[in-house]
Amino acid sequence: MEAVVNKSFTENLGKKLNSLKSKNLYLKDFFNTWDKTGDELEIVLTVADALKSLRGGNFSTKIFDSGLGVSIFRDQSTRTRFSFSSACNLLGLQVQDFDEGKSQVAHGETVRETAVMISFMADIIGIRDDMYIGKGVAFMNEVAAALDEGYKKEVLPQRPSIINLQSDVDHPTQSMADLLHLSNHFGGLENLKGKKLAMTWAYSPAYGKPLSVPQAIIGLMTRFGMDVVLAHPEGYEVMPEVENIAEENAKNQVGSFKKSNDMKEAFLNADIVYPKSWAPFEAMKERSLLFEKNDAEGISKLEHELLKQNAEHQNWTCSEELMKTTKDQNALYMHCLPADITGVSCEKGEVDEDVFEKYRVPLYKEASYKPYIIAAMILLSRFPDGNAVLNNLQKDKQNRVRYL
Amino acid sequence: MEAVVNKSFTENLGKKLNSLKSKNLYLKDFFNTWDKTGDELEIVLTVADALKSLRGGNFSTKIFDSGLGVSIFRDQSTRTRFSFSSACNLLGLQVQDFDEGKSQVAHGETVRETAVMISFMADIIGIRDDMYIGKGVAFMNEVAAALDEGYKKEVLPQRPSIINLQSDVDHPTQSMADLLHLSNHFGGLENLKGKKLAMTWAYSPAYGKPLSVPQAIIGLMTRFGMDVVLAHPEGYEVMPEVENIAEENAKNQVGSFKKSNDMKEAFLNADIVYPKSWAPFEAMKERSLLFEKNDAEGISKLEHELLKQNAEHQNWTCSEELMKTTKDQNALYMHCLPADITGVSCEKGEVDEDVFEKYRVPLYKEASYKPYIIAAMILLSRFPDGNAVLNNLQKDKQNRVRYL
Amino acid sequence: MEAVVNKSFTENLGKKLNSLKSKNLYLKDFFNTWDKTGDELEIVLTVADALKSLRGGNFSTKIFDSGLGVSIFRDQSTRTRFSFSSACNLLGLQVQDFDEGKSQVAHGETVRETAVMISFMADIIGIRDDMYIGKGVAFMNEVAAALDEGYKKEVLPQRPSIINLQSDVDHPTQSMADLLHLSNHFGGLENLKGKKLAMTWAYSPAYGKPLSVPQAIIGLMTRFGMDVVLAHPEGYEVMPEVENIAEENAKNQVGSFKKSNDMKEAFLNADIVYPKSWAPFEAMKERSLLFEKNDAEGISKLEHELLKQNAEHQNWTCSEELMKTTKDQNALYMHCLPADITGVSCEKGEVDEDVFEKYRVPLYKEASYKPYIIAAMILLSRFPDGNAVLNNLQKDKQNRVRYL
């Protein structure tokens, strides 16, 4: 089977890529979406879409003949782990997991040293570190500084790029996959202008879910002219610095950023709803301090309080009635998965079974973009001209599956 | 070194493949051997043999330029794990293990969701789930249904094929490797007609070994004109539905399927003996129920009873005396390994050390076919014409090891 | 970007390779450096350097189109694990880790069997087994014998080569990486003649560090005309058989091998210092016996005694004052990493923070050679003529990173 892609589609992608400017992707890390320009984000989306088309058309997209994609997961993961593996495999990199359990990364000195030790043949390092406030970004910065030094001192033959696979602050591979889903769902980024997106807290019996998803959503979606509402019960504030970013974003756009303590208000006439549990920022800060002090009793007490606090807001759930108040009773429901579904995965949770079931396939679609977003981030951090790479791949017409 | 295979050998394989009909391999799962026609099974054996020859002749057999082979092992495994890895590597797929310990697959909803989440770039999914009666096949069916839906709803760009790496019912990669061993040992499948195969229970101090091996053997070997005897102490029955399949198979062949409670009778004049421990079906059913109810005390009690019951049958062992009663005192001894060897791995076990030692090398040979059987299953589930793929590989003459 | 290497550099490497004789690399295992001739060791170093240049010049060095590099780590590892992965990836092999936790390797019979089971498609097997005196080499020999038999009996299509990734006796991938570092630092192996190397014990609060590093260093460095001093407190002797090897080596060279119980004496005018903690050989022998007898109380008592014994020698530390007594106050400080750094990773350790910090980048460089040393060992054990392979790689000019 000859490798085939829709020619006009790829020509359009090429034209789009040529019209966009990038200074901060090639040989750069990807920590937060707000570190990148709007053009740069569009380039990532466009390359992700192009890679998806190429693979769908049975093109090989191996741009590395060998090389390592090192992953550091400091938290459990299925979706992101598979997405990172898939992305690396798609481009020809071998994943090598750095399992801290089989090593010891205890203090600054050793992070610095270890970062170099695992990077002699690494092209990419993907890091998930989302558990403790103030820790994830700090860890990534520490790794980045060590790599900078290693490269400068000619110990590393190249400076591997770091991709944030979820920090305590941002979750860019998730929010960019979400954005690509929105763009494809509504027929283009330009159609997102004026759409109302409700990023709302929702009740879950689980405790201490990361803040990075709501922060990633308000930090990114406010850049595309949407009317973004962040709604949560009092006491469930997210990081002020990210709220500030969202506010600044909105100022530069046709859209807006608003906060609310009323889920109903947020859902009213919303085009998109993203109801999801998270832990209060202040409590998470306190928890980080307790962990530092190794105060098991204090942690246990805090968890108890937080669960009690959560339980007061069981009415924050994405019910069918609430969905009926959205635009045309038909808002697009989003979630990073897995969701806590009432009557399925828990007694009472973030969303009713009927609502979840109705949106299950779109949710799968939303998730399906993540491997391509990560692959695009890798490609654009290692090649100066993404469009040239895509053209070469199309010209070479190597099949992913041979002899078909 | 130029890539070389014995030309007449591969021509014969090609002729054989052209003469065989297949409807149920391409884009299909491989759950049980009895879901496939005799022609289809012969195709798998032939392609496995051809891949072995090609690799032996230093041909590259990479038919995938990238792609994932996802493995889900819900039980410990060395042999099958390495066989699956080897098969994937042989064809160019990257293994990505889905480790449930790093995730949570608790109930139906999540299996369905997870199956899709790990499959966005998967070509193949290999599943071992053999621990609980009624669970393994159910799990595989659940995954299959989720993949069907994901593909139909255009969430998955392709429907990955599932290979059963051992369920509670069948163990097709084992029994097919065993069959290839028999075919090569006796000079062809046609020479298996009229051979007596004794699949017998044997004593082991370990408790609760899966039923899938004896079931796989009686469900497969009854299709090739052999006289298959299933022998075990009373109370060690296998699943009735598989016994029925074996009986039906035998009716359509020159061979036969008989049951016995006498190991001596089974061994008498046998051409092939396969003595191996397993747990009683009824007890395993009970155990599954106890696990569902989380009844630790009940389980402990059942285990105690089963070990006691086992101990009453220590004379069910493959001794040299017993081997002397077989055809020409020289039956082929088979085992899926590892065996419980008396005086080596346990005080009293399935087989005497002398017998095991005599057959050690043939046992290794038996095991050596499994990677190629799995590779053949993968190839035939992803390509409509196995023979064309093999011809292309031979024509292209890419070396596996370059510059030799 | 066209693949480029410095032509005169690679020509020189080629000339060197042509002038050296090897009988014991191709299709051989690499257990101890003293099993190899000086020429053979130089070949390994030269090929390692060449592979580093080729990768630096964006050459693909994939000599395997598929194939497995099996790793068996019976001890924690970051550096060596990543080095082995990197080496395999560089050459085109897929790492498959044999995790004994997911299997059972309990006694001789099973080691023999398992060695074959994991080797059907293996080209290389890397083994780390350094925990117990008398065990590591024994295990490797057992695996080797099983592979020999498997190949002889035509169960294995090829005999995979074993690389010692650290045994109880030698740590050749470490010492060869160290040697390549020395050679590049001092401008060639010939410049090592007459250099004084102090391999000294140093205090660490950790207990029971392997002997293989000091043994590897004295067993290797005494072959290149260096004046090697092994210094340690009384009672911290290494294996007598390796001391004998070092003595024999020295006799055949311009250099020398001396022992001392005085760290200051060892450091005086040294060109190179390698201060590192290890456990006393006699105590390690006793510990192995206690483990065999499963004597937890005895082990605990021994550990207690050893820690107490260690604590008596806290003055054996690599301080700045001591460094001032070395040649030109500027000896090259070496360590296999991670080091126990006073005030950083422990209260009192092997080395002062200032010393470590001064040599941090050279230490990284030292470590950076290990992947290439392992890759060279793999290449030379699978190809009869390393130089021909390197020439072919240069001629073919495949890029590692395409479309750059």
Image (spheres, coloured by chain):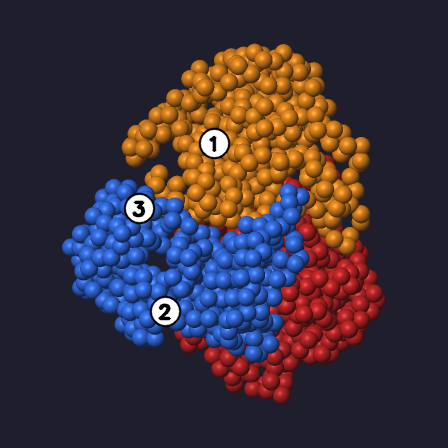
Chain colours: A red, B blue, C orange
Check disc 1 and give the amino acid type. Ser
Q: Relative to C121, say whether A360 is above or below.
A: below
Judge if badges 3 and 1 mark residues of a common chain.
Answer: no
Residue, x 59% and y 19% (percent of image)? C223
For this rendering, which residue is in front, B253 or A159?
Answer: B253
Q: Position of residue B85 (x, y in %)?
A: 51, 54
Please report, as a chain letter, where disc 3 is located: B
Same subunit, tags 1 and 2: no
Q: Mark 1 near mark 2, Cβ–Cβ under 8 Å?
A: no
- In-front residue for pair B182/C101: B182
The number of numbered badges drawn on the structure is 3
Return the mark for residue B223: 2
* Amino acid found under the numbered disc labelled 2: Arg
Residue under label 1, please give it. Answer: C167
Disc marking residue C328: none
Q: Nearer the viewer, residue B93 or A115?
A: B93
What residue appears at the point 62 percent right and 47 percent down from the top-left corner? B401
Residue drawn at (67%, 26%) of the image: C20
Asked if the residues shown at circle 2 and circle 3 are in contact, with their CB atoms under 8 angstroms apart, the answer is no
Q: Which residue lies under the disc numbered 3?
A: B356
Horizontal side of residue A316 vs B355, given as left or right: right
Q: Is residue A4 left or right of residue B55?
A: right
Q: Which element type, helix, strand or loop, lies under badge 1?
A: strand
**Residue C20, visible in the rendered structure:** yes
The quarter of the picture where the C terminus of chain B appears is top right
